[in-house]
Structures are given as structure tokens and as C-alpha cells.
Image (cartoon, rainbow, N blue to C red):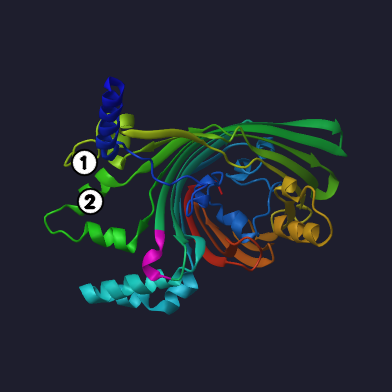
């Protein structure tokens, strides 16, 4: 009887404490809606997007080493002061939806109408909504250093219900240090560029927010929605130190073959925090807003997030026989070659099409760049303009977010403004 009473008391205590136990939210890449957070970090390159994503062996640009560290060999001095890149997705659909005209009216009814039209552009499945990149880069004597920050607003719509659209905000900071050198194997016949880069990345993303969850925060006039959001929205954050190794085999007439092993050691050490305030309290020593008490525990769970290792190959032809008048470049890359392993016949042909990137660019008078590319069968165009130390790049392209080509293509428009080396 005594043991029965002890067991009964223990059960009652367990039931009483259950509501106080913090349960981690379903926000991992394996959970519905969060697949995109596991993508390896790659800052937006307007130049590459205009060329269909191809350009492993294209040298001479400040960000070339971020895609192939071997491009640092003989790179010389380059300095790009803080640049900004803004990418809007579904730009044509947004213009046609009438959302912008509704927002311009400014009244409450128009703002609600504009928001509904904007959400109506988002279709079922995964996608992106808006991305902003900030970066600064420096190269000298074979060494390269890059500091990047990116804000990415992703979307996930499980069905056709407009209010079921989830927005996931992610912020990433990365510092990349690389070194490259050139090895002359056969003079005037073959030389090899080799390079390695190490990247320290910190990634943080918030639990997805739907239209209903956002409206609930604004439903009470006595509650500050910003303070409520910071104190109750779970945040997932962690770090990784991926490594990339690259090589260029350079031949006469501007021909080169490239190989890059990227995202080695790309596993993130992650933690799930009860809220953004709790993350700030743990990491920075004080919360963003102290209107609400800190959650206990602040850290709900510690876990690991794996990102995919990649092996890419590229072919580049960049002849220099016309000097600075006209500089043409043709690039063909095959990315994620390992993804084609074990496939045969039609499946192999389809995989090859999905993994192949084709790009071409022409630089005129060292002032203008005109670019064209094909990525997974989708065409892209890009332009670049240099005026002394000011540079503007633009690209219009399409990304595939579905399982197969044609499932869910989303068009995007990227604009980049920078000062310093191109």
C-alpha cells in the first residue's frame, strides 16, 4: 500500500508539471515548412545569376573566390566596400496583382487589400519572397577575405488556403578567408590554380508566422505586438565552419577546367530558444525587450543540422585576343555531380539537365557587361555597368522550388549596388 501511494503521488506530480515543461516547436529542416533553412549559405551573386548560375572558373571579379577559392591565385588587389543586393521574387506577378497600387493609397482598407493580393501571389509549396545581402570583400597576394550578411524571407504554403501561408525570416552572417596559388606545370601549356577557403557561418531563423498568428498579435490594443512577438516567437540559431577546396586547370587560348569540393564540414551546431528575447539574453547578455519575463528554460533543445556536401565541375573559355575592347566568356558548370550517382537512362539525362548551368557574358570597353544563361532549362539575363568606382548589376532569372523541373518555377529580379573593385 505504501508503494502504491508513492507511485500515485509521483504520477500526480508528473501530470501537474506537464504544462510547465517546454516542448520544442517543430521547426527543424525535417519538419514541414522548413526545408529551405538547411540550404548551404551562398550570398546572392547578381553576376552569376545573370549567367544561369555558371562561372566556377570565371576570374577577375571581387567575389570569384567565394565560388571557387582557386580563383584567388594571381587575383591581385581588389576592394569592394559595403555593397547591397536586393532580390524580389515573383516581381511580374506582384506588379500585375495590384498590390503596389493598393499600398500607395495608404488607408487601412487598402493596406489590407494590398496584403491579401500580395499573399495571393504565393503558390503552394516552398519559395522565397525577399532577400537582402550586405557584403564587403578584399583580396591581395593570393589571400581573400569576405564579410557577408543576408536577410532572407522564405515562404511555405501547405495548401490553397490564403491564411495558411507561412513566412519564415532568416538572418545569416558569414566571414570567409581563402588562399590560392598558381603552379606552373608545363610552361605555356598547363598551369594549375589551387585554393582553399574556410567560412565561419552563424544562422538564425524564427518560427514561421501565418496571417492568423500575426493578426492575433495585433488583436489586443493593450498589448505591444512587437514586445509580444519578441517574447513568444521561438528562434533557432547555430554555427558551422564549412570548407571549400578548388582547382583550375588552365590551358592556352583561355581554356580552363575547374573542380570544387564545397561545404565540407558543413554541419551546424544548433539550439532552439524559447524566444528571440531568450536568444539575446543567452548570447548577448540582455534581451531585446524586457517587457515580458524571460522564459525558463531559455534553451529548449540542442541539435545538429546537416547541409549537403557538393562536388562541382566547370569549363570556361575566356579568350583575351581582343584586349579590353571586347572580352567574351563562356562557362559550363555541372553542380552536385554526386546527385547523379546510380542513375541511368532517362533518369540520368534528367538529372544532368537539372545539374547543368550554361552561361555567357561579353564585357565591352571595360564598362559594360551583358550576360545570358540557362539554368535547369530556365533562361536568365543580366547587365553590369561600371562608372569609375561605382558599379550596378542587375539580373532577371528563374529558380525551381519543386521536386522536378516545371513543378514550381519562381522568377526573381536582383539589383546590386557597390563601390570599389568590380
Residue at 51 percent across and 46 percent down: it is 29
Is 97 positioned to the left or the right of 314 in the image?
left
From the viewer's perspective, is residue 101 above or below residue 28? below
Within-10-Å neighbours for mark 2: few <14, some 14–19, many 20+: few
**Number of other residues with Cα within 10 Å of mark 1, as a class: few under 14, some 14 to 19, many 20 or more:** some
Question: Picture quarter containing residue 74?
Answer: top right
Q: Residue furthest front?
A: 1
Q: Quadrant of residue 187?
A: top right
Q: Which residue is mark 2?
A: 226
Let me know if residue 54 is in the magenta part.
no
Mark 1 vs mark 2: which is more N-terminal? 2
Residue that lies at the very extreme toward the left in this rendered image: 222
Q: Please provide the residue range marked out in magenta.
A: 161-166
- Residue 60 higher or lower than 270, as above or below: below
Q: Is residue 253 left or right of residue 174?
A: right
Q: Nearer the viewer, residue 188 or 293?
A: 293
Q: Residue at x 34, y 72 (%)?
A: 116
The Cα–Cα distance between marks 1 and 2, rounded to whole angstroms, is 9 Å
Q: Which mark is residue 365?
A: none
In the image, residue 80 lies at what x, y percent? 50, 43
Q: Position of residue 401 (x, y in %)?
A: 57, 60
Q: Secondary structure at mark 1?
A: loop
Q: Secondary structure at mark 2?
A: helix
**Foreground residue, 386 or 47?**
47
Asked whether the beta carbons under mark 1 and mark 2 sit within 8 Å of each other, the answer is yes
Q: Is residue 64 visible in this depiction of the protein?
A: yes
Q: Position of residue 127 (x, y in %)?
A: 50, 60
**Quarter of the image containing the N terminus?**
top left
Dot 1 corresponds to which residue?
A: 289
Residue at image point 16% right, 42% down: 291
Amino acid at each position: 500500500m505504501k508503494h502504491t501511494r508513492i507511485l500515485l503521488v509521483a504520477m500526480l506530480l508528473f501530470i501537474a508539471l506537464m504544462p510547465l515543461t517546454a516542448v520544442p516547436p517543430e521547426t527543424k529542416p525535417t519538419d514541414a515548412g522548413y526545408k529551405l533553412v538547411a540550404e548551404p549559405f551562398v550570398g546572392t551573386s547578381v553576376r552569376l545569376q545573370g549567367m544561369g548560375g555558371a562561372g566556377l572558373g570565371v576570374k577577375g571579379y571581387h567575389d570569384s573566390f567565394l565560388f571557387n577559392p582557386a580563383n584567388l591565385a594571381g587575383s591581385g588587389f581588389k576592394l569592394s566596400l559595403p555593397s547591397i543586393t536586393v532580390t524580389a521574387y515573383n516581381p511580374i506577378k506582384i506588379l500585375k496583382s495590384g498590390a503596389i497600387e493598393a499600398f500607395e493609397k495608404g488607408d487601412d482598407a487598402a493596406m489590407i487589400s494590398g496584403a491579401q493580393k500580395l499573399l495571393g501571389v504565393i503558390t503552394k509549396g516552398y519559395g522565397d519572397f525577399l532577400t537582402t545581402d550586405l557584403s564587403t570583400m578584399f583580396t591581395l597576394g593570393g589571400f581573400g577575405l569576405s564579410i557577408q550578411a543576408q536577410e532572407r524571407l522564405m515562404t511555405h504554403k501547405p495548401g490553397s488556403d490564403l491564411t495558411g501561408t507561412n513566412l519564415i525570416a532568416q538572418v545569416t552572417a558569414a566571414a570567409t578567408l581563402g588562399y590560392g596559388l598558381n603552379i606552373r606545370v608545363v610552361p605555356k601549356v598547363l598551369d594549375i590554380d589551387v585554393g582553399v577557403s574556410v567560412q565561419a557561418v552563424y544562422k538564425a531563423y524564427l518560427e514561421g508566422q501565418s496571417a492568423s498568428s500575426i493578426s492575433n498579435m495585433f488583436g489586443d490594443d493593450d498589448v505591444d505586438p512587437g514586445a509580444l512577438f519578441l517574447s513568444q516567437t521561438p528562434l533557432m540559431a547555430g554555427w558551422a565552419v564549412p570548407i571549400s577546396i578548388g582547382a583550375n586547370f588552365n590551358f592556352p587560348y583561355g581554356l580552363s577546367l575547374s573542380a570544387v569540393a564545397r561545404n565540407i564540414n558543413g554541419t551546424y551546431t544548433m539550439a532552439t530558444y524559447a524566444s528571440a528575447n531568450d536568444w539575446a539574453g543567452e548570447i548577448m547578455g540582455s534581451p531585446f525587450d524586457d517587457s515580458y519575463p524571460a522564459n525558463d528554460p531559455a534553451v529548449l533543445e540542442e541539435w545538429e543540422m546537416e547541409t549537403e556536401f557538393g562536388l562541382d565541375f566547370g569549363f570556361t573559355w575566356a579568350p583575351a585576343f581582343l584586349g579590353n575592347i571586347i572580352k567574351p566568356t563562356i562557362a559550363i558548370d555541372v553542380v552536385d555531380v554526386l546527385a547523379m550517382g546510380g542513375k541511368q537512362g532517362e533518369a540520368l539525362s534528367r538529372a544532368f539537365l537539372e545539374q547543368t548551368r550554361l552561361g555567357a557574358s561579353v564585357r565591352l570597353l571595360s564598362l559594360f557587361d551583358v550576360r545570358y544563361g540557362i539554368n535547369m532549362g530556365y533562361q536568365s539575363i543580366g547587365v553590369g555597368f561600371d562608372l569609375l568606382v561605382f558599379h550596378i548589376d542587375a539580373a532577371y532569372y528563374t529558380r525551381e522550388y519543386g521536386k522536378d523541373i516545371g513543378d514550381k518555377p519562381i522568377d526573381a529580379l536582383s539589383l546590386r549596388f557597390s563601390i570599389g573593385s568590380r
